[in-house]
Amino acid sequence: MDREVKLSQDESLSIKLSYLLLPKESQRLDLYFSLPVEMGINASTLSEEDYFHAHVKSHSAYYSKQLHLPLVRSRFISQSKGEKADYRLNLNLYSYQIRLALEADIKQTIQLKEADEFYPAAIELVEQAQVLLKKLRRYTPPDKKLKSYFENADNYLSWHTEQMFLKLLSKGPKNSDYSKAREILRAFCRGENQYRSEQEYNSVLTLDDPNRITNKMRLLQRLTEYGVVFSKETKNLNLNLQRLVRGTVTAVIMAFVMFLVLNARSNFQEITVALIAFLGVLYGLREIFKDDLTRIIWRKIKQGRPKWRHIFRSSFDNKTIHTQTVWLEHIRRKSLPEAVSNLFKKRRQQNKQAAHLIHYRCDSKVIAKEFLPGYEEIQQQVYFNLTPFVRYLKKGAGKLYSLEGNKVSGQSVERRYQINLVVTYSANSSHTATRYKITLNRSAIVSIEEMPD
C-alpha cells in the first residue's frame, strides 16, 4: 500500500491532498503554510474559523487500487442474486469504480502525444467501456423502485462516458492516417447519445440547455455515490468552552462593576449629575473591557487546542466509519517542529523572506474493523482553496524593458508569489516530511514543485 500523501492542483486556485486509510488505523497529517508578509495574510485579515468553513473541504470514500478499466470487478448483481438492500449499494459501487477508472485511463491516454500510441490506446478504452456498460445493462430490475436506481446510474454513466471520450477526441493528436480510429470514437459517442434518447432519460428541454443537463448529471452523480462516499458531520469542539469563558468573564466584570456601583451609591447621598456620569462611564468601560478581555483570554485558551471533529458515516447503514480531529491556527516560527523548521531553512537565501505561518493538523482514526467486501482502504481527500491568500495581491503586471540594437522594447510580465508548504504525515511507524513550492499569481496557481530534501 502506498503510504504517501499526494499533493496536486485541483482547480485554478486550489490544491488537493490524497492519502489512504486502513481499518482500525490512526494517522496524523500536518500542513505548514509559509506566506510572505507582502501577501497581507495574518490573524487580523484571515480568521481561522472563516477559512476552515468556507475554503477547506474533506471528502472520504471507499477506494480500490483497481483504477483502470480492465481491472474493474463486476460488483453489479441482479436483484435475484441478493437482497433488495444490496442491489443499490452494489450498483453504486460498480458505477463509482467505472467512473474513477475511466477518468484515470482517459487522463493517461491524453498524455500520449504520438498518434501511433494514442489511437490504439483510445480504441482499447472504447472496447473496455462497451463491455462494462453492457454488463451494467444486462439486467434491468422489474421492481419499480429498483428500476429508478438503475436508470439513474445508467443515464449518468452513459452521459459521463460520452463526455470523457469527446474530451479525448478534442485533445488527441490530429492525424489523417487515423481517421478510421477517430470515426470509431465518434460512433461510440453517437451511440451512447442515441441510447439515452431511446430510453427517454432526459427531456428535450433539458438537453437543449447545457446548464440544465450538466446540473442534472451532477445530481445523478451524487445519487450514484450513495453508500460509497461517506456522509460527513462536523462538530465544533470548543463551542461550550467558548461560552463558558464568555460567561465567566462577564460574571467577573459584572461583580466588579456592582461593587463599584454600590460604593458609589454609599458615597453619593442623592442622585446627581456626577453620579449619573460616573455610572455611564463605568458601564461604558465594562462593555469595552468585557469584549477585549474575553478575546485575549479565549485566544490564550484555544491556542493549540483542536477545533473541529469530522464524523464520517456510511450513508447506507449510518455506521461511523472513521473520525477526524482538526486543528487550524496562525502560529509563530518558534512553534515549528525542528524537522519542519530545518526544511524551511533549506530554501535559497533570496527566498528567505519574512513570512506568516498557518498550521493545519488532522488526526484520523478509523473505527471500522473491516470495510465492504472487495475494499481494503479508504481514500481521504482534503481540498484547500487558496483564493483568500491572494485577495490582497496587487493587480496588473509590470514591464520588462530590453535594448535590441537601437530599439527599446517592453515585454509584459505578471506578478508572481511563492508559498512554501511543508507536509508531514505519520501512520504506524512510517513518517514523511516534504516541502513544496507553490507559485501563483492573482488568478491561478502557476506551478507546484516538490523540493528535494
Image (cartoon, grey):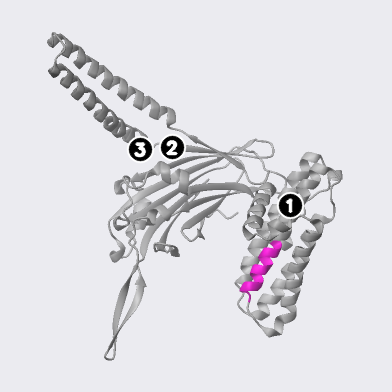
Q: Quadrant of the N terminus?
A: bottom right
Whether residue 98 can be seen here:
no
Name which of mark 2 and mark 1 comes first in the sequence: 1
- Element at label 2: loop
Which region of the structure is painted magenta? 161-172
Q: Quadrant of residue 182?
A: bottom right
- Element at label 1: helix
- Amino acid carrying label 1: it is Ala
Residues tagged 2 and 1 counted as in contact (Cβ below 8 A): no
What percent of the width, then of the height, locates residue 303?
35, 37
- Amino acid carrying label 3: it is Gln
Q: Nearer the viewer, mark 2 or mark 1?
A: 1
- Amino acid carrying label 2: it is Lys
The residue to which callout 1 is attached is 153
Whether residue 350 can be seen here:
yes
Q: Residues within 10 Å of mark 1 (few under 14, many from 20)?
A: many
- The circle drawn on residue 303 is 3
